[in-house]
Amino acid sequence: MMPPAAPAPPAPPAPVPARTRPTLRQHVAVWYGIVGVPAVWAAHVLFCQTLAATACAGGVPQRNGEPWPVVHWTLALACAAAFALALAGALLAWRTWRESAAVNTPQRDTFRFLAWSSAAVAIAFTIALVFTTTVLFALPLERLCGALR
């Protein structure tokens, strides 16, 4: 009786072919991370501040303003939409940074640095968006406005 044969070692993974240039999707992802995610955060802050300020100007609830439940739900939807856009930008930037190692051009280091910067900026502004949203909903805006009447 012959002993069982040892299993064959696994085949090494196929090498990832190096691209010679970054793709258009990678360029868009880098610039969306650097410029788009901060713009999403800024637009979110301006929209939420404007909505809350017009609902309660100077501590006085406005008669022609939206009722607080509508303001609250509008703020929640704006926060969810901004978070989705920021998170998508952060994930795309992170993925592009990881993929930038396969780029093989003379400007490889420049593109890799831009991709890393894009991921860092997008992640930082996504965290800032979460912080802004947390503060927005942690403050009792309706009670603050009603207490100042």
Image (tube, rainbow, N blue to C red):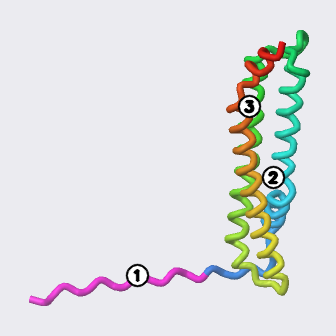
| Magenta residue span | 1-15
Q: Is residue 140 left or right of residue 67?
A: left
Mark 3 and mark 1 lie on one chain; the one further toward the N terminus is 1
Which label lies toward us, 1 or 2?
Answer: 2
Q: Amino acid at mark 1?
A: Pro
Q: Amino acid at mark 2?
A: Val
Predominant secondary structure in magenta?
loop
Residue at position x 83%, y 60% from top? 34
Mark 2 and mark 3 lie on one chain; the one further toward the N terminus is 2
Residue holding disc 3: 77
Q: CA distance from mark 1 to mark 2?
A: 42 Å
| Marker disc for residue 37 | 2
Place residue 43 in its image quadrant: top right
**Number of marks in picture:** 3
Residue 60: where, in percent of width, then height? 87, 15
Quadrant including the C terminus: top right
Residue at position x 74%, y 63% from top? 119
Nearest the eye: 21 or 49: 49
| Marker disc for residue 10 | 1
Which label lies toward us, 3 or 1?
Answer: 3
Q: CA distance from mark 2 to mark 3?
A: 17 Å
Assign a secondary structure to mark 3.
helix
